[in-house]
Amino acid sequence: MGVKRGLEAVSRWSAVGHMKIVSRGTGLSQRCCAGWLPAGRPYTIAFRSASNEGLFRGPHESAGESEGAVSKSQDRDLGMHRGITRRDFVNGMGVAVTGALITPDWLSAFGSPDGYRPQEYYPPAQTGMRGSHAGSFEVAHALRDGGAWADVADTREHYDCVVVGGGLSGLSAAYFFLASAGRGARVLVLDNHDDFGGHAKRNEMTYRGRTLMLNGGTSYIESVGQYSTVSRTMLAAIGIDIASATATSNAGMGFYRSLGLGNATFFAKEVFGEDRLVMGRGGSGSRGWADWLAQTPLSADVRGDIARLYDDAANPDYMSGLSDVDKKERLARISYRDFLLDLAKVHPDVIAFFDDRPKGSFCVGIDGYPALYGWAQGYPGFQGMNLEPLPRVSPLTHIGGGQHGRESEWNHGDDLYFPDGNATVARLLVRAMIPDALPGHSLDDSITSRLAYDRIDRDGSDARVRLNSTVVSVRHLGDPEAAREVEITYVRDGRAEKVRADHCVMACYNGVIPHLVPEMSDEQSAALMYGVKMPIVYTNVLLRNWTAFTNLGISRATSPGMYHTGVNLGRSVQFGDYQPSTSPDDPMILHMTRVPCAPGHPKKEQHRMGRQDLLDASFETFERNIRDQLGRTLEGGGFDPARDIEAITVNRWPHGYAYSYDTLNDPIEWALFAPDDRPCVVGSRRFGRISIANSDAAASTHTDSAIDEAHRAVREQLVVRSRARHTNSGSDLIPSR
């Protein structure tokens, strides 16, 4: 699409949203601001019933079109004809659109320009395509593709600090600033989504008067005992007694085991030749694995090689003659896939059995996963290599799953799960800053209290959280090192608006910051652009009951090579008055994970291709694959996808986990020893009155990293604030709040 056609398309959108974009030289891409509304192609929002049962379809997503592994002839058996709850818009509002971009934030029900939000506005209850939902990324993609915004309205609002991004790092930054900047300080948080929390989102689903919840993103607080003093203190300050909460969390984690439910593996016909659900997962030693593998559809050669990998006596030292250090360095530079094929000499079909294992942490298969990490995390095949265990005090301790964070691999007994994942942390941060937005005073009552979204962006409040607001420009008013103010421009309801602030914290993705702050140096911009966010999908499915699982005797099933890597029952943790599903006859939310990969490509390219996969996939594609996979996996338990599925929420995160360094794709020192020359450190340097806070700045996917980086960013700006006051008044004292 040329510039002219792109602008013509945008002009059609303007009729609804008053959005004006002018070319800045590069034009709009063929995908035109996100790839979901090409110019000149009509879109329809077709609803399957008069209630909250709608499906958004694009030009390539007709109801009868076959996508994924299932033909359209099977759609009725899967229940694709059934109306299910898909509240993609407020209250499932039915709207017909032709040739115009309609996003939730442009509907009057989502509020007015003064920030008012009606009580009916409640994003956690929306289903359908969530995460990076329609309306959350189109403006950013237009900016990426050369768009600029004319007729910027001056709100005449001024804040002590504006935070760009309302995820856990952004909310933490706002909290830290208010706690330290002095009485009367004012903070505004801007976020492009229709809900705060970033990846820490809550999904609520209701069936027959019973409301259940599950995480739509960040799942849990990993190894909270290893958190920094800053992170632990903040959690305590907002109402989380770590010892008590961890005990409550742990008490519920064994519920399914108490019912005799275990794990299973579903072997899919498109990967392994036939569909077969096999209970359990291996056994002790080679004999146990051989007995379990005998139940699978794997060939005799593949079964034999897998059993051999788990046999301590059958694995030689593949690097005999090398020192321990030299062995580890070599393992660091080859993938686990190459280790299996080239050193262990396994049958090529063995790869499919192991390929999904690292995806939950690394968003890549074993072709992009260092063999050294496999050894550190207990993958089989290394038993004969006589590798020295990692000392608990060594920097190398974290080369496994913890290499991209600071959590210890030694003890996960203090993992902390809330019913909605880390959305609880986000909600408590909002309560700490805007107390009347979330009724109550304790962690327990926060779980079931309904957050009042109409109260988070009000005049006169010290803290304001403004949703559906995509920042497109952040600039100093004057020389960056001498300027006293920063101007922030954002697009809301299709209209560009600007505010000013003494300080700004960028808590959005690193990769977007150079587009928002083009005055940064080339060196810093390049460092910010180095990493590629890892795509991932958290899918939640509401069932009318979960008797199929108890009939089969399982609580989870992994599915190597399938669209989703597996399915598990929602966590059974109880806080306060929240009651999880405890009877198989009760409704239940299932959790499924998808990690789109492209084996054979470099890791960064796999992440880019996976991101495009998620943006291209329609909700219908997800729904069909979900119904198909659940129907086949649970068939033996009496599950009927057409009968038993009540709602589906697809939490799509094309920009998911923070990029983490690894020994295959990055300098080995970056991955193992965290030196200060890493791009994440160079990119996060303070730039005048702008500081950067996000998990990208730590190259870590973990919650404590987001909090710690927020603390650093605010500390940087408080130093600037103090020096300015000292210059102006002769005092460097910061008044206490």
Image (cartoon, rainbow, N blue to C red):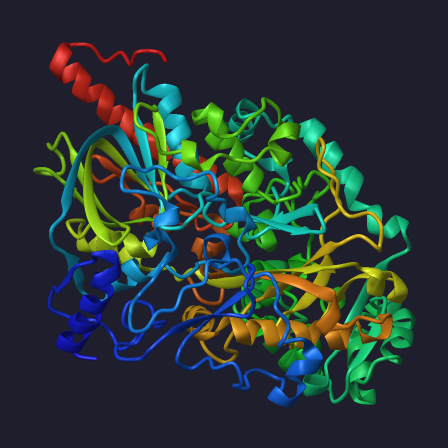
Residue 33 position (above or below residue 440): below
Please tell me which residue lies in front, 332 or 589: 589
Image quadrant of residue 444?
A: top right
Residue 494 position (above or below residue 623): above
Quadrant in the picture for the N terminus: bottom left
Quadrant in the picture for the C terminus: top left
For this view, does 215 lie left or right of residue 314? left
Percent position (x, y) of residue 467? 37, 44
Percent position (x, y) of residue 567? 70, 64
For this view, does 556 lie left or right of residue 669? right
Residue drawn at x 54%, y 47% as measured from the top left = 124
Percent position (x, y) of residue 478? 7, 37
Residue 50 position (above or below residue 705): below
Image quadrant of residue 136?
A: bottom left
Residue drawn at x 50%, y 80% as measured from the top left = 600
For this view, does 439 lie left or right of residue 5? right
Q: Can residue 645 be seen in this view?
A: yes
Please tell me which residue lies in front, 499 or 210: 210
